[in-house]
Image: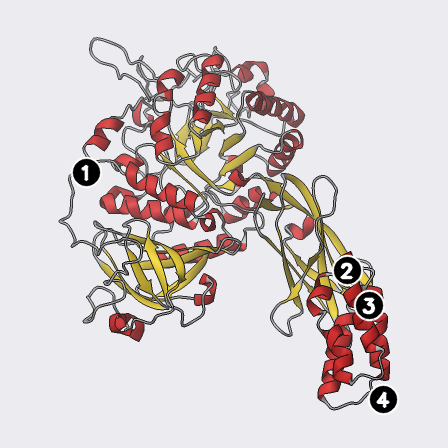
Amino acid sequence: MSGRFPIEDVSPVVSCGRYPARAVVGEVVPVSARAYREGHDALGCNVVWLGPDGLARPFTRMRPGEPGQDRWHASIVPDAVGEWMFTVEAFSDPYLTWHNAITKKIAAGQGPGELANDLAEGVRVLTAAAKLVPKAEQARLRKAAKALGDADRPVPQRVAPALELADLLWEHPVRELVTTGEEYTLWVDRERALYSAWYEFFPRSEGAIPATVDAPARSGTFATATERLPGVAAMGFDVLYLPPIHPIGRVNRKGPNNSLVAGPDDVGSPWAIGAAEGGHDAIHPDLGTPEDFRDFVAAAADHGLEVAMDLALQCAPDHPWVTEHPEWFTTRADGSIAYAENPPKKYQDIYPLNFDNDPDGIRAEVLRVVRHWVGEGVKIFRVDNPHTKPVDFWHWLIWEVKRVDPDVLFLAEAFTRPAMMHGLAKVGFTQSYTYFTWRTSAAEMREYCAELVAAADYMRPNFWPNTPDILHASLQHGGPPMFKIRAVLAALLSPSWGMYAGYELFEHVARPGAEEYLDNEKYELRPRDWAGAEAHGRSLAPFIATLNRVRRDNPALRRLRNLVFHDIDNPALLCWSKRDPASGNTVLVVCSFDSQTVQWGNTTLDMPALGLDWHDRFTVHDELTGVSYDWGQRNAVRLDPYLQPAHVLTLHRPTGVTQAATAGAADAGSPGLTGTEPATLTTEEVPADLSGGTAPTAPAEKDDTRWTS
């Protein structure tokens, strides 16, 4: 820092500026700093920000925050991918100093004699300002300066034209004693780095034919997997994530359910990478050829899907690297190569890499592999277990890749300690898996999301209700409503979310004693009857499509920093909103965490967070049912897990009418509506007939037909 005034606690800054803060193109990025000065003269602050092209963007004045805290705030909106630089400047603002002083002196009754020096100072400031404002405004400043010097006018008339320049000179200030703060970096990705909907399937299962007594199993191919693309696209997903597509090792291959002995038809785990056919840059011959993969990527793009690949830096015992580079692995005391372990789990079919024996060699090879797949059209990588590799390696690899191709994105699959998860995000990972799966109460979810919002300058969450490795107990035992509940939470709390195939079919049977699927697809082919499930109404696909359509139609849901929680008096319910200031789009969600019983609750909404005044009435439209309601700050809600476990409400302009007759217990703030119906009608029970909606139907009987083992 150089200059007169202290500039402290600048944000967004990650690890004292060691790593760049993050944003995406079009995101509103809040910038703040603490700056102050001696005495009573006015201080001003602004942000200087430079794009990847090195050119300065428009002058951005910062506004003071809470009085007495000396915190200054502004927002910038980057418009290009790449490395941006920003600096906070503080300056003495002579016009604002003059404006404050002369208005107080006039109010105190001081006359022209006592104000002579102040009037002269005003002329000086306006003369300087005339050189800074747009040409069309210069005459206005000259006229105001002339009026200040006209002794024949009464004082109020002399100063009035100058006082009217406050807005203009806020945007084009005279800056004196300018202090320049430290320069900080902001890395800006394409929007998909923050806003995305992921779907995971195993291409070998799509179109596969399991083994029979008369015939061996037959793997699906890229060609047969292409037939599944319309179904994935119809659900509204935009990223299709494929587990590893490489040759699978035969040595120590695992059988069904992770058994140690594999039969002749067992396909093995795709994460046991490498065999005689090749390693990380090769394609499993059962799936097709490199040309088939290119056709698959192109077909996915035609359906609006971007293919993400798995980057798993580990090897099967018969991977070519094992013989070509034995120094890349850990040798045990008996001379054998150490296989992967996470006690008590053992992965005899996988050798982890040792990054210490030949770090330069491993780095060069991994960079080559990544660039190979980027050349094949892959710009997104889901990285398997990055927390088991050196953090400095990832810092090097990610930025080495982005140096050539800044559009490449990396998702960290790191279910590990918070410090490591946050550290991987800081060094460059674009998105991160999270603890979302294990946050199963409203209080836990609210606390955890607040933690993620606080880290939004560098960490972007991706919420997954299930993965091939994780089938949480809530899904094992919660019934179909829990699948809806977890999808609502994942899709509408986080701007990025994902799910693994089978979720829409309510697959929920776990391997005894484990938090994972029985007959796990990691170890066997698992073809599914997608069309039959939808034809018989046993698919969640239409509901998923609605959630992704709501996300697509509402820009407020594409951001993380705007997440606001609202109070509700039932601990089984969670209420939150997101608002996009640019468009005014606002979404308000109330979701139950109870998949078994009806829950009631009363909201107490933070109205300014919704862009409203405290006493406004407004219309909400439920995107799940098509029903509209007249709401205010306090509203009673009723959520039936089988009929409707959540409200997903888009806000419309205030109605300007207080409907006291229908307010009932909701606006009276009745406490304790946690399971019994209120005695009077509530605003929710009387839909406003503003959007063609109809009143909610009576609860139907519970339908358990889809919940079979």
The kind of secondary structure element at disc 3 is helix
The disc, 4 or 1, on the residue closer to the chain's N-terminal end is 4
The residue at the point 23 percent across, 62 percent down is 685
The kind of secondary structure element at disc 4 is loop
Circle 1: is it few (<14), some (14-19), or many (20+) Cα within 10 Å?
some
Q: CA distance from mark 3 to mark 4?
A: 23 Å
Relative vertical location of residue 302 with respect to residue 460 in this rendering, above or below = above
Q: Which quadrant would residue 515 be assigned to in this image?
A: top left
Residue at which label 3 appears = 142
Q: CA distance from mark 2 to mark 4?
A: 31 Å
Mark 4 vs mark 1: give the one in front. 4
- Percent x, y of residue 526: 29, 24
At label 3, the amino acid type is: Arg
- Residue 133, which numbered label? 2
Residue at which label 4 appears = 113
Relative vertical location of residue 645 with respect to residue 212 in this rendering, above or below = below
Circle 3: is it few (<14), some (14-19), or many (20+) Cα within 10 Å?
some
Q: CA distance from mark 2 to mark 1?
A: 68 Å
- Residue 68, which numbered label? none
The kind of secondary structure element at disc 2 is loop
Q: CA distance from mark 2 to mark 3?
A: 11 Å
The residue at the point 82 percent across, 77 percent down is 148
Relative vertical location of residue 621 with respect to residue 325 in this rendering, above or below = below
The residue at the point 36 percent across, 21 percent down is 225
Circle 2: is it few (<14), some (14-19), or many (20+) Cα within 10 Å?
some
Mark 2 vs mark 1: give the one in front. 2
Residue at which label 1 appears = 706
- Percent x, y of residue 695: 21, 56
At label 4, the amino acid type is: Gly
Mark 3 vs mark 1: give the one in front. 3
